[in-house]
Amino acid sequence: MTEQLFANDPALLSEVLRCYQPHCRYLRSASVRVHGEQATATGEFEIPASCYIDATGHLNSVEANICYNQLLYQTVAVLVRHNVGTLFSGWTMDEYWRRQLPDILITRFDSTFRRPITPQRFTGEFTLHSGVARTSTVDGAPYTSLDTSFRFWDTNGGHCAGRVRLAIVTTAQPLGAAR
C-alpha cells in the first residue's frame, strides 16, 4: 500500500473555512497523508483572541473542538477533491459543500488536557481511523460512523488529545441547491 501526501492547499482551506466567522478561522495550513483508508492531517493553528471569552492564556476545550472541526473539514475536502479512499469516493466537491455542515455530526467527543497549550501558535493532528455503514436504532436511517482522534501541542510542552466519533447522515440538500 502506497502512501499519498497532499501538501497545504491555501485556496481549498480558504473555502473550507468560509463557513466560520473571520475571527474564528484558526487553521492556517494543513497537509494530509493517506495510507490505505487511514488519513492523517497535520495543521498549524493560531488563535490571536478567543471568539467567546476573555483570554484564559491557554487553549480551552471549546477552541480545541473548533480546531478539531476545521482540521476534520479540511481533511474530508482533500479526500473528496482527490477522490482518495472509499469513504467519500462517491462525493463531488459540490456535494461536499452541501453536506459539510448539516451532515457531518459529532456524536462523541472525549478530550484530555495534559499541559496548557499556548493558543497563539500550536500544531494539531487529526486522524481518520475507520468508517463503517450503520443503521440508526432510533429511526432505522442509514449513516456512516467514523472513528477519529486528534492531538494538539505547542513548543512549550503543552499537549491535549482526544477521540471523536462522527456520524455522516444523509440530510444533504438536493443536487443543484445553492451553496
Image (cartoon, rainbow, N blue to C red):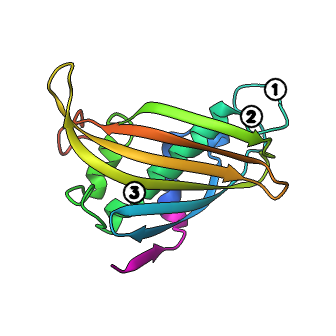
- Which of the numbered marks, if any, corresponds to residue 54? 1
Q: Image point 45% across, 49% down: which residue?
A: 73
Q: Magenta span has 10? A: yes
Residue 10 x %, y %: 55, 65
Callout 1, which amino acid?
Answer: Asp
Label 2 with label 1: CB-CB less than 8 Å: yes
Q: Where is residue 49? Give x, y as percent.
A: 78, 38
Residue 92 rendering spot, x and y as whole percentages: 25, 57
SS for callout 1 = loop
Mark 2 to mark 1 CA distance (whole Å): 7 Å
- 29 and 161: which is toward the camera: 161
Is residue 165 something one can see in this rendering? Answer: yes
Q: To which residue does mark 2 refer?
A: 50
Seen at 36% across and 80% down, the residue is 2
The C terminus - image quarter:
top left
For the record, the magenta segment spans 1-11
Q: Secondary structure at mark 2?
A: loop
Compared to 43, does 35 lie above or below? below
